Amino acid sequence: MELFFADDIAGGRVRLDAEESAHLVRVLRHRAGDEVSVIDGRGTLYRCVLEIADARGAEARVVEEQPGFGAHPYHLTMAVCPTKNIDRYEWFVEKATEVGVDVIAPVIGERSERKVLKTERLRRITLSAAKQSLKAAIPAVAEPQSVRDFIAAAPADALKLICYCFDDVSRQLISSVLQPEAERPLMILIGPEGDFSPEEAALARENGWIPVSLGESRLRTETAAVVAATAVYLSYCQ
Amino acid sequence: MELFFADDIAGGRVRLDAEESAHLVRVLRHRAGDEVSVIDGRGTLYRCVLEIADARGAEARVVEEQPGFGAHPYHLTMAVCPTKNIDRYEWFVEKATEVGVDVIAPVIGERSERKVLKTERLRRITLSAAKQSLKAAIPAVAEPQSVRDFIAAAPADALKLICYCFDDVSRQLISSVLQPEAERPLMILIGPEGDFSPEEAALARENGWIPVSLGESRLRTETAAVVAATAVYLSYCQ
C-alpha cells in the first residue's frame, strides 16, 4: 500500500499539493476512479477515490476514515543532540519514525560540536518514513534549542530519562524504569559525542530527570537514540 | 581511548600492519614509549608500549592482556538478506556491531532483489565499528549463501528465530521468546524487502525456527535487523 500526504482535507474531499499530485498521477499513473490512501499527518488515514487526476493538483473523495492508523501506545519525545556528521542524525530520525516516536527535539549541548541544524530536511525524512512505515501520524520536529532550555521547559508529569556516560550516580537500565502501564508521556535526552557537561547532567537531575543506562556497549549518539527508542517500543509491545 | 587492530601478536610482541602503523604513527603521531591499546579481533585487548614507531610496520611490547574486553553475555548470529540499497545493509552491520553481535551472515532469499554482495567492505565496517565501540572481538562476516542452505545448516542446539510478515502462524513478540538464562547460541533470520517466500518460511519452521514478531510497526529490512539485535542486547542487560 502506498500512502499520500495532504494537509487540505475538508468536507469529505482531499486536495493533494503539487508534489504529491505529481507522484500520484505522473509517477504512479493513477487515474480518476482509482482508490488512494491519504494521511493527514495527525493520525488519520483516509481511504479515497481519486476524482481529479491532475498532476498539479489532484483531488479525491473520502470513502472511509481510519483514526489512529499505525499509531503506537505511548507518547515519546526524543531530545537528541545533533551529530557532527548530519547523515547520522538523519538516519536516527528515519529509524525512530519507523519504530515509533512522536516528537524529535534537536537539542544543543554545551559540548555539541554542531550548534546549528536545518529542520526542513528532517521534516521531509519524517514524512517519507511515516508514509513508508504505514503511519498516519508524522512525528513533529521541534526547532533546535539548548539542552538547558529543554530541561527547564519539560513538563512535570512526563517520565523524563537522560542517558549519559560518566558515573556520577548509579543508573538503572532504561528497560527497568519504563512504565508501560502508566500513561505518562515519555521524554528521552541523549547527549552529543562529547557527552553532556556535568552541569547539564546536574540540572537535569534537579529537574526530575532520571539517569538511565543503555547497557555496557559504548554507543554512538545516533545509535544510543535508536536503542533508547527501541527499548520504549519493545516495552510497550509487551 | 583509541584501539588498534593487529593479527600478528606473539611472544609478548605486537606487530601492526602498514595501515594501522600509518594511522598510529603518521596520523596520531605516537612515539616510542607511548602506551597503545591493541585488539586481536578475537576478544582480547593488549595494553602495550610502543617500541618501534615505524609508519610502515610499528611494533609494541605487551604490558597487560584483557581477555573478554567489551564482550557481551550472548552469542548472536544475525542472518539478514541484503537490501537493494547497500548503504542500508552497511548501516545495519555498523549498528549491530556497536550493540553487540558475533556473526553477520548475509543470506539470499528467493525474493531478494540483490543476489550478490561483496563482504570485504562489510569486514572493514565491522573492524572500525568494533574499534570505535571499544570491543576487542570483531564480528565474523560470513560469505553469502541461500536462505535455504542457511536454514538447513543451522545447529540444532541454537535458539533460532525467524522474522517475517505474513500471518501463516501466530507469533510471539521476540522479547518474550528470548531466554537470557539459557546459554544457547542465538540465530535471527531477517528477510528481504519482499519478505521470505512461503516455502522458505515453512522450511524454517520444519527445521525448528520459531516465527517471532517485532511488534506492530512495519520496519524496513535493516531496521528490523537492528531492532531484533537490540531486543537481544537489552534482554541480556537485565
Image: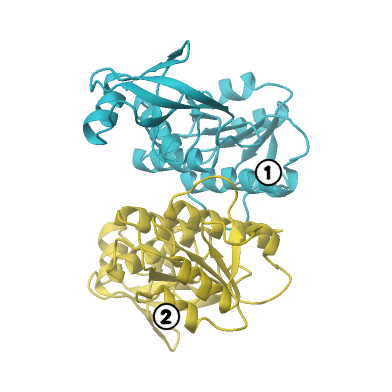
Chain colours: A yellow, B cyan
Residue A2 sits in quarter = bottom left
The residue where tag 2 is placed is A149
How crowded pointer 2 is (Cα within 10 Å; few <14, some 14-19, many 20+) is rated as few
Relative to A233, residue B57 above or below: above
Is residue A78 something one can see in this rendering? Answer: no
Q: Chain letter for mark 2, please.
A: A
The C terminus of chain A sits in image quarter: bottom right
Residue type, label 2 = Asp
- The chain letter under disc 1 is B
- A220 relative to B159, above or below: below
Gap in angstroms between the C-alphas marked 1 and 2 = 35 Å
Q: What's the residue at 39%, 25% (across, down)?
A: B49
Q: Which residue is mark 1?
A: B236
Q: Is A215 left, or right, of B6 in this rendering?
A: right
- Which mark, residue B88? none
Residue A156 location in percent, x, y?
59, 84
Looking at the rendered structure, the secondary structure element under dot 2 is: helix
Does residue A104 appear left or right of residue B232 in this picture? left
Question: Where is residue A147 drawn, in percent x and y?
Answer: 42, 73
Where is residue B219 drawn, in percent x and y?
Answer: 51, 52
Give the camera-side residue of A78 and A196: A196
Q: Residue furthest right?
A: B181
| Visible residue check, residue B199 | yes
